[in-house]
Amino acid sequence: MKIIHVIPGSGGSFYCGNCLRDSEYFNAMRKMGHDAIKIPMYLPLFADEHDLSGVPVFYGAISIYMKQMFPLLQKAPAWFDKLLNSKPMLKLAASMAGSTRAKGLDEMTISMLLGEQGRQHEELERMTDWMAEHFKPDVIHLSNALLLGLAHKMQEKLDVPLICSLQDEDTWVDVMNPASREKVWSLMGEKAKFVDRFVAVSRYYGDVSVKKMNLPPEKVTTLHIGVDPADYTFINSAEKSRNIGFLSRMSHENGLDILADAFVELKKDMKYQDVKLIVTGGSTGDDARFLRSVRNKFSSLYLANSVEFHKNFEGEGRKDFLRKVSILSVPVRQGEAFGIYLAEAMASGIPVVQPSLGAFPEIIEKTRGGLLYGENRPELLAEALKILLDDREKLRTMSMAARKGVEEGLNINTLAAELINIYNQAIEEQHVVNA
């Protein structure tokens, strides 16, 4: 089967769960013998650009921003676009404030969802022409519903089934002003008619999407995120030093300060003096002030030597991080649609400690690989961490359960086969309609 995955990139400036999720599925499908390609949008997916392999980055972040803000640039010569979308410029854009957040980009988000009627219509033509010329697919998979402005033109030009994942669109849309927020959800619901099947990464988020986008429930299937257990080295956490880890973009939204305050609470007790906090996941310019405040808190309390900011969060750097950590917590303020860091940690035998928000209860119930605490407050997180820090036998048992939970429930090889079945069903249904 020939498969196109269209994926917005982060440029590798921070731990991008969506990029990793789609890459895991892509790799598993290639291993199964399917002919799949990734088409990045806005920015490359990873810092080392290993995702590109000759495929252009469409809708270059700098170019579409400039043209949205300054309409006269719509008629700029081709060399101007080529300069703005060059690799050095896109790398610079990835690290800048505002490069990956919705605030201030309301109009552009709406324009993108308008598709052929939006200001980026020429780039939409370029993308679909490239697909038709270089890789006529059997199915196209859009990474999230914010890309639904592409759907009609793709359907029109390529005439293949369209699949769309549902994951965390609300974290982008719901920070907009009320009028823009309503318009974006409405447009996504309207454009949903061009999609054959939606795939939600959790039951929780499938329900959220059905409500916010007014989707027919029968068009939404739940398929969790997974990883390949063979890619992760299992080390029982009971055999490691007592290190607490954080693996995600180091931001206020992801609750790094909540974990920092919980760590401070722990360190008030001498029995936790050996415990360290190891933080990784990268950041953008938007996070700079926040990170300074977190670092300053540790310094002011003489805890800097007990905290490590692990710089390399891609490839071997992330594996090194996972080898050092015995418990992981990413206390996302509003919860999350899934969080692939959960699967990565548990595949390594690292139990997770998460607030009872979003899909976290669903994932921990499925794997038995972690603990939940109630309201997302530092003191409650600290108490939950103590349960595993104080009981080596419980930590040992939960470490083994975490690994087993991924092998049996979040194994990307099994999940990718299920996704291929969804593709085949959509293809068969289209054949019936066209017959």
Image (spheres, rainbow, N blue to C red):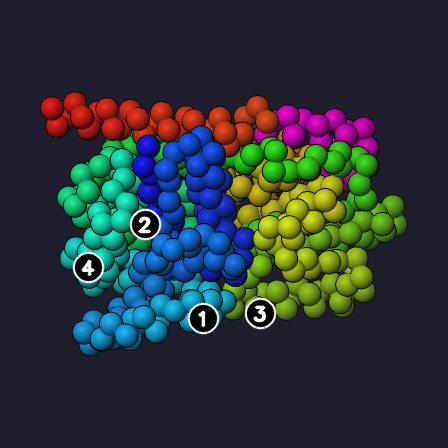
Q: What residue type is labelled 3?
A: Arg
Which numbered disc, 2 or 1, marks the residue that appears first in the sequence? 1
Q: Residue at x 36, y 25 (%)?
A: 421
- Judged by depth in the image, the label closer to the viewer, 3 or 2, is 2
Percent coordinates x, y for residue 347 in the rendering: 63, 35
- CA–CA distance in space, label 1 to label 4: 25 Å
Residues in magenta? 379-406
Query: For residue 385: magenta?
Result: yes
Task: Name the quadrant of the N terminus.
Answer: top left
Q: Can residue 73 be seen in this view?
A: yes
Q: Is residue 133 left or right of residue 85?
A: left
- Residue nearest the observer in this picture, 246 or 10: 10
Q: Is residue 201 left or right of residue 378?
A: left
Percent coordinates x, y for residue 334 in the rendering: 50, 46
- Residue nearest the observer in this picture, 315 or 170: 315
| Residue 397, image quadrant | top right
Considering the numbered disc 1 on the image, is that residue within a helix, a strand or a loop? helix
Residue named by callout 3:
289
Considering the numbered disc 4 on the image, is that residue within a helix, a strand or a loop? helix
- Judged by depth in the image, the label closer to the viewer, 1 or 3, is 1
Q: Is residue 202 visible?
A: no
Query: For residue 10: magenta?
Result: no
Q: What residue type is labelled 2?
A: Leu
Q: Residue at x 27, y 40 (%)?
A: 137
Which numbered disc, 1 or 4, marks the residue that appears first in the sequence? 1
Residue named by callout 2:
146
Residue named by callout 1:
88
Which numbered disc, 3 or 2, marks the residue that appears first in the sequence? 2
- Judged by depth in the image, the label closer to the viewer, 4 or 2, is 4
